Image: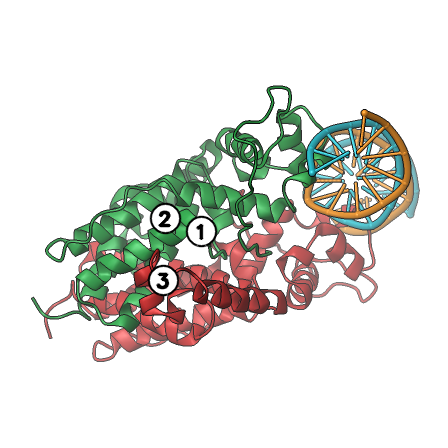
Chain colours: A red, B green, C orange, D cyan
Amino acid sequence: MAFVLPQPPRKGRARPEPGTRLSRESIVDAALAIVDAGGLDALSMRSVAQALRTGPASLYAHVADKDELLALLIERVAGGHDLPDPDPEHWQEQLKGMVRSLHHGLLAHRDLARAALGTIPLGEGALRFRDRMIAVMRAGRLPDRVVAYGCDLLPLYAVATACEQAAHADEEGARFVEAVRAYVAALPGDRFPHLLAVGAPALGGAEDGERFEFGLDVLVSGLAAYGPRT
Amino acid sequence: MAFVLPQPPRKGRARPEPGTRLSRESIVDAALAIVDAGGLDALSMRSVAQALRTGPASLYAHVADKDELLALLIERVAGGHDLPDPDPEHWQEQLKGMVRSLHHGLLAHRDLARAALGTIPLGEGALRFRDRMIAVMRAGRLPDRVVAYGCDLLPLYAVATACEQAAHADEEGARFVEAVRAYVAALPGDRFPHLLAVGAPALGGAEDGERFEFGLDVLVSGLAAYGPRT
DNA sequence: ACCTGAACACCGTTCAAGT
DNA sequence: ACCTGAACACCGTTCAAGT
């Protein structure tokens, strides 16, 4: 895990010559396409370079290292969300909408969320998103301390659940989840009575949507409990 | 990300001959020591082999692949927690205690939590932990559906926060967090008014303990809201 | 300034061969 | 059954050299 502060935006000509195919943007484009196609494990400096028909060394003229490239990918998906106008009447639903948007935005790129986990995105888009999330919570008249923690907690939830769901989303993951179900069902009932009693949903996997919404509800109503009583 | 079902425990001699240094256990020991010393990135089949004074190929007689080794590491730390006797009077505090135990147990091994994220640990110890966590929530008379989701949600929180904190725990991470603080403080106030108003704690980093406890409180009281009113 | 080939120091895993 | 050396197909990154 390494860390990258955003680089100040480059001056740059408005448009690269048609012959030139390398730029920060084109590199990020290519990288995202690779992640979309094969997941984060398929992403390497070499695979990106190959997609751009160069050698890996060429990338280093535009990008400091792989960590910076990952940060740029996260930044790309952290921007591009619709941001609600804070409405004191509907702040909880608005807040949920933002968390959903982040979550699904990540899931749209396979297991890219894994690269977002220890990260603190600081680009334009990510900061705007965060600023707005805070605004929505303030519209709900939550105390500053709660807002400050909440705007970490909610994205953490969005990212962590995206990681988990992505891990079980591909074919191999689905097979594993199925095997888990069978394994648990065959467990000796006298040794794990509560696990068996609560049943299948007690061990990860399907019903991801429902599970995600449940956690989201717990979190947002838990935060709301710190606000003025309605 | 790959998945590993637990192997049935080996018969195994009680004790390897003194000359023999390879076994599942000794491999896990060595791997854990490497993670403790240098973090997850320092762990490779080769580094483990070197610590055991063999070549990497020798490990494959005892461990299917690196993913299985990681699963064994997770299993090792998922076991070895003190489990409370479910007490209907104190179930919320007991639940918190279990989440704290998991969280700190992971953090004791640097960024090992990163390997636990998409994972569903299925070993003896992990299942006992999960069974007990369910028992505690049932002692609180939460509905089955809430229990089933809750016993995923709470470990997810323990693991995700451990990932995050570990990422900022080493020297490089601390430096980065410091840089973030400065960067945010210098942000144009008219563009990110809410972010600036809420201030420093609104962007990751220090006060990790307080932050963790806050989220834990939100989650557990959020779950408790589904139970009988007290 | 940007791009390149070649090289360095690593990976995980396999496989034929040894004991 | 367990262990080994050597090899295969990869990594990220650097660096001198080209344009």
Q: Is residue B145 left or right of residue A100?
A: left
Labelled disc at residue B204: 2
Residue B27 versus residue D10 in the image, above or below: above
Provide the secondary structure element on which disc 3 rests: loop
B164 up-or-down from A81: above or below: above
Image quarter (top left, top right, bottom left or bottom right) of the N terminus of chain B = bottom right
SS label for mark 2: loop
From the viewer's side, name the closer residue of A60 and B49.
B49
- Residue occupied by mark 1: A120
Amino acid type, mark 1: Ile
Residue A207 sits in which quadrant? Answer: bottom left
Q: Which mark is residue A7?
A: none
Asked if residue B189 can be seen in this view, the reply is no
Q: Is residue A227 visible?
A: yes
**Amino acid found under the numbered disc labelled 3:** Gly
Instruction: Specify the amino acid type for callout 2.
Output: Gly
Percent coordinates x, y for residue D10 in the rendering = 77, 49
Mark 1 neighbour density, 10 Å: few (under 14) some (14–19) many (20 or more): many
Please, what secondary structure does the residue beneath circle 1 have?
A: loop
- Which residue matches tag 3? A189
